[in-house]
Image: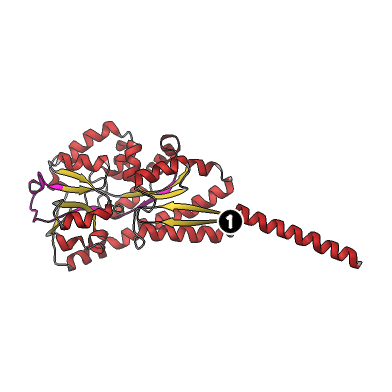
Amino acid sequence: MKKRTFIKNLVVGSAAAAMLMGAGTAFAKEFRLGLITPPPHIWTKAAGAFGEELKGKSGGKYSVKVFPSRQLGNEAQMLQQLQTGALDMAFMTIAEVSNRVPDFGAFYAPYLARDIAHAAKILRSKTATSLLASLPAKAGVVGLGYGSAGLRQVISRDPISSADDLKGKKIRITPFEPIKDFYKILGTAPTPMPLPAVYDALANGQVDAIDMDLELTWKLKYTEHAKTVVLSNHMMFPMVGLVSARVWKGLSIEDRAMIREIMAKHLDSTIDKYVAGEAKFLEEVKKTGIDVKVVGPDFFGTSTDQWNSIWSKRSSALSALRKEAAK
Ligand code: BEZ
């Protein structure tokens, strides 16, 4: 090759390489993913692992910045941001989703799941998965799969020997309708409150009891200000991985498939963590010396039936999910 041709090729080649590198940078996208849980929580760790894997598998084209602990607002605010496209992704309680799409309230049917392994089966069923299809039209978000937290219990400042002892008491709930109805039926005063406010509210007597799972009861030390854990396992507590429908529309089919597969895998890993961890969380709670009162559906009398009669009118998914659970 003549010297001039060699230099020309070199210049053209370098320019092309620079353009490609520039294009690589231009196409790199950092998704913002919000959650309400703190950094050490299983959901937050799963979000981080999702981001790492997506970055690796996309060759750096996509990365994820995780915003834990309500940094971007509460779940209602985050859902709004997803709808406008101001937020790309979120791992969110089904609780908030059920406030917008009442069909999802069916997941909170008291004693839908017998135990945490049964809850995992329900969440992995086709019936549960098919519910996600309604989300783009009804809520402006795309649901890529379910995750989970532990089953719900009642942690009380006072000793509790029957459901009558709960009557008239202020009980902290996660802010959503199905659980509010459950505690109203029981004759209590359900008090909606976000997670970060719970410890102080229990400590200073602003509430008499809290609706909570075993993991957080142990890790956030709610036992320090309570006398009884009513081990009722009365509800499951699913989570869903969401992407803004507006953001989703702008992605290629291949990229959507990659994001769907990786996110669904990490969401699902949270379900396994609670199936494996629930017994340990209970042991840790017991080690604090708190009284643990084991109860079953009978403890709540007819309230489950009353809840079902309200929610069979509000959620068209309830009977299908009950059938799925009975399989
Ligand atoms: C709660 O509000 O109790 C809660 C929220 C997210 C994860 C676990 C618990």
x and y percentages locating residue 213 in the rendered image:
25, 55
Most distant residue in the right direction:
2
Secondary structure beneath dot 1 equals loop
- Look at the image and tell me whether residue 116 can be seen: yes
Report the magenta residues as a range.
141-170
How many discs appear? 1
Q: Nearer the viewer, residue 92 or 113?
A: 92
* Residue 118 vertical position relative to residue 40 in the rendered view, above or below: above
* Residue 93 vertical position relative to residue 318 in the rendered view, above or below: below
x and y percentages locating residue 240 in the rendered image:
39, 48
x and y percentages locating residue 136 in the rendered image:
45, 38
Q: Nearer the viewer, residue 312 or 87?
A: 87
Quadrant into which the N terminus falls: bottom right
Q: Nearer the viewer, residue 62 or 148?
A: 62
Q: Is residue 148 magenta?
A: yes
* The residue carrying mark 1 has its beta carbon less than 8 Å from ligand 1: no
Q: Quadrant of residue 308?
A: top left
- Look at the image and tell me whether residue 327 can be seen: no
Q: Is residue 10 magenta?
A: no
Q: Residue at x 12, y 48 (%)?
A: 299
Q: Is residue 169 left or right of residue 262?
A: left
x and y percentages locating residue 151 in the rendered image:
26, 53
Q: Is residue 304 left or right of residue 237?
A: left
Most distant residue in the top direction:
313
Q: Amino acid at mark 1?
A: Lys
Q: Residue at x 45, y 61 (%)?
A: 49
Q: Residue at x 26, y 47 (%)?
A: 174
Q: Residue at x 75, y 57 (%)?
A: 16
Residue under label 1, please give it. Answer: 61
Callout 1 crowding tier (Cα within 10 Å): few <14, some 14–19, many ≥20: some
Quadrant into which the C terminus falls: top left
